[in-house]
Amino acid sequence: MIDLRSDTVTTPTDGMRKAMARAEVGDDVYGEDPTVNRLQDMAAALLGKRAALFVPSGTMANQLAIRSQTQPGQEVIVESKSHIVRYEQGAAGALAGVQLHWVTGDHGIMTAEQVEAAIRPKDPYSIPTALICLENTHNAGGGTIYPLSTIEKIRTIAVRHGIPMHLDGARLFNAVAATTLPPTSYAQYFETVSICLSKGLGAPVGSLLISSDQQVIDRARRFRRMYGGAMRQAGILAAAGIYALEYHVARLKDDHDHAKKLARLLQQIPSVQIAPQHVETNIVIFEVIDQRRSPAELVAALKEQGVLINAIGGRSFRAVTHLNVSAKQIDEAGAIFTRVLAR
Ligand code: TLP
């Protein structure tokens, strides 16, 4: 089976499993797990920040960023197709008590003008804007890379209004691999950044919230406990994360080449609508015009032939490349797509 549903389906490599088995551990609620501490220090240093917190999921990292930098009754600016809006089960409202202000970007990318227009005036009637969140790469936008110049312009506006910024960098290292820019070049514009180890980087579990402000991380540590995310001998998981950051960043480039190849193969199928120039990293979003079969039926027909993808609403589908999919399997997947979709 060629599983292109997500890069979250990756499984630990032999080298990663060995690192996990060897990991020195302690009780992380006491701050005594040396491997967790090493991962946190490593991640903070990589992004040029002061401190980091290891958490079970990307969702928790984003939610801790929101909870730790806002007060109930405030507003957070987010892109309308962002993970925070679409896939976090309303957590920002339910857990942080904030309201989300959606801005619709182009392939997930908001302009500085749009962000500025969304900032509420400081008057007795308006809800205060407390945080601006960007997503890089943008998942539902199609793995889009945020242009650094756009981030810089948004930052200038945020600073002018005294509003902190959070980056959902679940796939920040895909942007890093694609642009060859250092992670610090992106991270410098944000008070907090979340990164996921369990997507293209291939770790089984784990994300980090990273910040330039030790107090934000201290608050996030307390809320992590509140949200049930404080773990004990988590060094076994952190060891996988360290291994992922050491060995699996450079190879993300292969996933991007595979995604571009897949996009070119899909483009040749008459019923498929795709803009290969928008495939910038490891996510391929395309539409299938098929009057006879529903999206669920198309997914089932592809599965029967050995390819798994996700239907993501309307006539759109998402295929994601990752370390468990080889170049040969991309060619095989292309042939299966042609066979099933051209039918
Ligand atoms: N994305 C998953 C699904 O939840 C949609 C996927 O298959 O792509 N930020 C971004 C940009 C993400 O894409 C995801 C996961 C998360 C945060 C949350 O990470 P987890 O799943 O670890 O909570």
Image (spheres, rainbow, N blue to C red):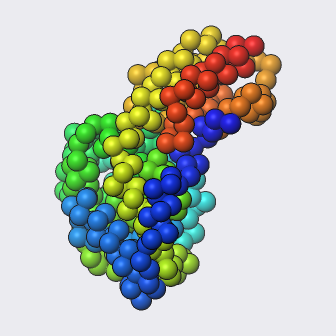
Q: Is residue 46 left or right of residue 270?
A: left
Between residue 74 and residue 219, name the one nearer to us.
219
Looking at the rendering, in which quadrant would you find the C terminus? Answer: top right
Is residue 161 visible in the rendered structure shown here?
Answer: no
Q: Where is residue 269 in the image (x, y as percent from the top left)?
A: 61, 13
| Image quadrant where one finds the N terminus | top right
Q: Is residue 228 above or below residue 140?
A: below
Q: Position of residue 157 (x, y in %)?
A: 23, 51
Image quadrant of residue 143?
top left
Rendering quarter of residue 336: top right
Q: How many marks?
A: 0
- The answer to whether residue 174 is left or right of residue 189 is right
Whether 327 is drawn above or below 132: the answer is above
Residue at coordinates 41% horizontally, 22% vertically from top-left?
A: 277
Residue appearing at x 56%, y 11% in the figure = 268
Is residue 179 visible to us here? Answer: yes
Residue at the spot 59% in from the left edge and 49% down from the top edge: 9
| 36 shown above or below 341 | below
Q: Quadrant of residue 331?
A: top right
User: Image check: 162 left or right of 20?
Assistant: left
Residue nearer the viewer, 232 or 298: 232
Is residue 9 found left or right of 290 in the rendered image?
left
Counting from the top left corner in percent of width and height, residue 17 is at 50, 61
From the top left corner, tell me how far across and down residue 279 is, in percent: 44, 28
The residue shown at (52%, 33%) is 326
Relative to the observer, which residue lies in front, 317 or 237? 237
